Image (cartoon, rainbow, N blue to C red):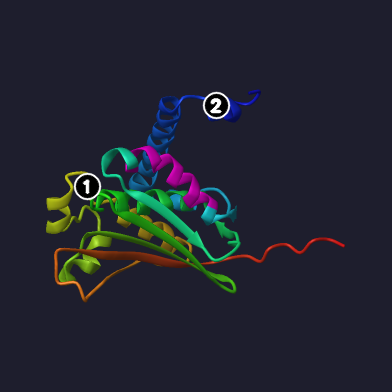
Amino acid sequence: GESFNQKLEKSDKSYKDLYNALELITSQLGMIDVILNPKSIEFGVKKKINLYRLFEKIKILFGHLSNKKQDITINIQSEGWVKDCYCYESIEFIPLILIDNALKYSGKDSEVEIKFEQHQNNLKIIVKNIGPQVKDENVSKIFEKFFRGETAMAFSKEGIGMGLWVAQQILQTHGSKLSYFKDKRENRTIGLNIFEFDIKTVDRPKPSC
């Protein structure tokens, strides 16, 4: 291959996994800036970003981990073409945080489902997984700094309780909000968890005559 991407595509799986792991670490380290200085969320200028492609990219980076750890499948669905959004670069941390959170708290041989629903100039993104459910009294607390519920800590030792707080700060800066729901018909500790948010989109440019 002539380009780096062509050479990477023809490389052994071990090299691809290593490259994706390094890309993932680089992205995760970038979140430290937001944690230390939340104002950095608004650094730069807003630009057109396609969140569907962004989630696909992060899915690929997490691919080797999801298969290696628990045989978890990441499935992204959309009914059609997804419009772009005007966002700060910090929006790139949203799929990183939500997919990481879903993988961390998913049971073995399960599926993380990411769905895009588009309604005119409004895009809804829904992330579902089967894992430990948040207790009713802790639902509002999961978006606070350093909070981890008892069921989460019992299920996974990873994490310090900062991801969802960072995601909420980023989305609020974009005029949105991250919400959590669960299947209340489930009385067990393990059940369906749903995170979702809405964000404004921009119209696709009309082709010139």
Secondary-structure class at tag 2: loop
Highlighted range, magenta: 53-66
- Work out which residue is located at the far right of the displayed protein and give it: 209
* Disc 2 from disc 1: Cα separation: 37 Å
Q: Residue at x 19, y 72 (%)?
A: 186
Pinpoint residue 194: horizontal percent, then vertical percent. 32, 65
- Residue 129: quadrant of the picture: bottom left
Graded by Cα atoms within 10 Å as few (under 14), some (14 to 19) or many (20 or more), the crowding at tag 1 reads few
Query: Was residue 183 drawn as part of the magenta stretch in this picture?
Result: no
Pinpoint residue 197: horizontal percent, then vertical percent. 42, 66
Pinpoint residue 58: horizontal percent, then vertical percent. 44, 45
Quarter of the figure that contains the C terminus: bottom right
Q: Residue at x 30, y 49 (%)?
A: 103
Please tell me the numbered disc located at residue 189.
none
Graded by Cα atoms within 10 Å as few (under 14), some (14 to 19) or many (20 or more), the crowding at tag 2 reads few
Pinpoint residue 110: horizontal percent, then vertical percent. 29, 54
Q: Closer to the observer: label 2 or label 1?
A: 2
7 or 53, which is in the foreground? 7
Residue on which disc 1 sits: 160
In the displayed structure image, the side of residue 13 where residue 146 appears, left or right: left
- Work out which residue is located at the far front of the displayed protein and give it: 109
Secondary-structure class at tag 1: loop
101 or 27, which is in the foreground? 101
Residue on which disc 2 sits: 10
Q: In this view, does 195 lie above or below 7?
A: below
In the displayed structure image, the side of residue 157 where residue 6 appears, left or right: right
Dominant secondary structure (helix, strand or loop) of the stretch shown in magenta: helix
Give whichever of discs 2 and 1 has the lower sequence position: 2
Quarter of the figure that contains the N terminus: top right
Q: Which residue is drawn at 52% across and 62% down?
A: 78
What amino acid type should be assigned to the residue bearing mark 1?
Ile
What amino acid type should be assigned to the residue bearing mark 2?
Lys
